[in-house]
Image: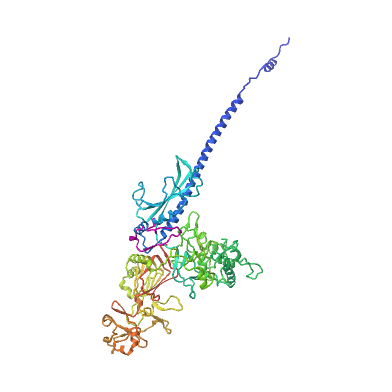
Amino acid sequence: MTIPSNNQNKQQSRRLRIPISRRGIASVLAMMFLIIFGSLVAAMAVASTGNIRTANMHLHVMRAMSAAETGLAVAEHRLNEASSRFVVAESDLDADITWALWKGDSSLIGTYEVAPPRDGYAETVSPAGIAEALVNAHSADENILTGYDYTESAEIETAPSDIAEGVYESSYWVNTPPILMSEWEDPDTENPPPAYQIRYAPLAGGHTIRVIVEGIVYDFQRNNKPIRRIITRDYQIIKSVDQAIIAHSKILIGKNVQIEGELGARFDEVDFDAGDPIVMRSDFLGLDSVLDTKITAFFEGLLTHDIDGDNRLRVGHPIEGAGIPADADFDGDGDSDGAFNDATQDGYIDEIDIFIRHYDTNNDNRVTLSAALIEGTRAGLDGSAPEFVGSSGEAIDEDLALLIDGGRPDRNENGVFGFLDINNDRIYQPEDEDPIDYDAFHDTYSDEELGWRDGYIDAMDRYAKVQGRLVFKVEASDWETGQGDIHDRLHGPIVPDDDESPLEFGADDLTLPDINADSFTDTENALIAAADGDPFWQQVADQLGTSTSSLSAWTLDMNPSGDDEPHLFPIWDDTDYDGLPDNYDWAYFENAPYNSPSYSDVYWRPVFENMVFRNVKIPMGLNALFVNCTFVGSSHVQTYTQNTHPLWSEYGANIIDAATGMPTPKFPRFVYGDDPGEDASDAPPMLPSTAVPPDQMILMTDLSISPLDTGDVPQSEVAAFGESYNLLPEPIVIDGKRVVDTKKFSNNLRFHDCLFVGSVVSDTPTEYTQVRNKLQFTGATRFTTVHP
């Protein structure tokens, strides 16, 4: 018998084992995954629903915000329109005046007029104040939301009871009904479309109006209440005009002149010779004969194709584009020049494009200035070759180059501009001086990055002859009937603000106010009162480090030695009555008007250099020249106002002696009564006792010329003149003294390279005598309200 081995037993044993079955595990796993996926689906559904609700809420919130922003734009327009209807004589609009304007308190407003509504709606009663004007404007609104517990008509009401005390005025709030932003097609079954409601709330003091605008959306409601968003903005009531210049006389804008702001011309006598309200000269004609040919061809296209009158032709426009001249070979090299391409890439062809294409030799759509003007600029650092130069490399027109490249100094419009004037010459020298607007984060000068004084004339300079629009009182048809085509008078691109026309004709008094001397009476008085600083000569003496008593005999060697220090070049008195200052051999004089080839007079002028005057009264008869001086605050120019004598401009007049080249009196005089045979008792009978010796020397015109007035004729010679004596005017007598030099009672001033931080105001003479009373601003004289 064979006995199996252990290995065999093990094998049999293995063969006899039955595997254990684990049924249901797959179902368990399936159920687990089903639960997990179900939970994820539920979570995703919940999250998606929340996202949808959040997005829906955000959408409606944004709709409410958009409605509020729309209402704010409407409110700003309405507030501007309502306030501009009130043309007031008062210029100093303090809180009392603005509150009176808002309420309509005529006893405090003073003289004023109420213009018709600019938006053209009908009014049953003219408004007494701005609040009533707003009510009238909003009463003309349509598409009002009614039936939701809102006011249904514009009303002036008291302030809500729950407002913060001391923040708002308690009365004269203007509440308006909500305005639907679209048509409510089915009020029975649909929620109303978005709406806005405006409220005008005067703040305490009455100088500021807070506009409160509520945007309302009913599509999504919580607790039966709509979604609301509120925007507020504060506005101050000020007096201003839209135009930078308003003139009753003709306006000439010559070469190398640019205007920022609107121009208003009330001149309408277009039937007279040269009766154009405005004449504008091209900045580019006369630079080069070939360029003149191109510009002339462009002007011909403007005559027939410039439909909006902006002196530009729109590229691709069906009418204006057809007026762009055809390209030609102007330089004779056999190829077309591309003279009328859009070099600035602004969609228009104008004179600056033609200028750039003419001088741009490397076709980079910009013109490099002369070598002297690019030193230290981006163009100089780039190594660019000068292009705006003649055949010998000389600059063609540096004034024009600086006007365009240095214009618009605040290129990024952040209110910071200018340069650090190290040498105090008020001329930017890029190689030595830096702009003020420095971006430390990017280590750049922002305005320079945007093209200011970068040495190039290009698109970044945004050239325009007038950055604004032209407004005329005269109708266009009347002007052209009297003078011919308007395009022949107006050269240079006119770039108005968005949505404004470049030209407006037939403007009414609301658009183009009738401004005259009476318009500034109150402001003039306030500015005169504000000139309350130290006396003029005291301010001069303080800066020279001396006393006022020493100034009457001041000499040039007494001035401080530094070029930038204050200097005085004096005019001494005429103690010997020869009609000349006693220091005439070294005193300064100049023709008036300054640099005019046909001057009217010659002035001996004291010169004040490098001085600062604060709230100063410039004394009558000073007739000075101020060089590189700064005037802070109110500067009051004093003069005698009763300048009604027919020969006012002749007394004290000078001419240039051809032999000496020096000024000499036009009407020489001598002292009467100090020589034998000249009896003071024989004084002219028209002179009062206070104007004859011993109170005053009698100065008569030289015997070789005819007398100017009866004060030049002694008592004993009256009969000899016969009837001619009665034709002579009476002498000028002021404060009991005879006047033979009206310069001492006038003020003809010139300000050269000066800075005014504030205002200049003068006494108002009765008659226009421009030779005697004149303010001339020359050089780089600037006006600003904030010291740079």
Left or right of residue 643: residue 485: right
Q: Position of residue 255 (x, y in %)?
A: 51, 70
Report the quarter where the N terminus lies. Answer: top right
Quadrant housing residue 658: bottom left
Name above or below for residue 674 compared with residue 179. below
Quadrant housing residue 20: top right
Left or right of residue 263: residue 202: left
Camera-side residue of 328 and 251:
251
**How many discs appear?**
0
Q: Is residue 274 visible?
A: yes
Question: Can you name the residue that lies furthest to the top here?
Answer: 1
Report the quarter where the C terminus lies. Answer: bottom left
Q: Is residue 255 visible?
A: no
Left or right of residue 669: residue 219: right
Camera-side residue of 148 and 47:
148
Q: Position of residue 559 (x, y in %)?
A: 37, 72
Camera-side residue of 49 and 415:
49
Camera-side residue of 34 and 162:
162
Q: Position of residue 570 (x, y in %)?
A: 36, 75
Q: Main secondary structure of the magenta part?
A: loop
Name above or below for residue 371 compared with residue 117. below
Q: Residue at x 43, y 75 (%)?
A: 594
**Residue 145 among magenta residues:** no
**Residue 108 among magenta residues:** yes
Name above or below for residue 687 compared with residue 497. below
Question: Can you name the residue that lies furthest to the right here?
Answer: 1
The magenta-colored residue range is 104-131
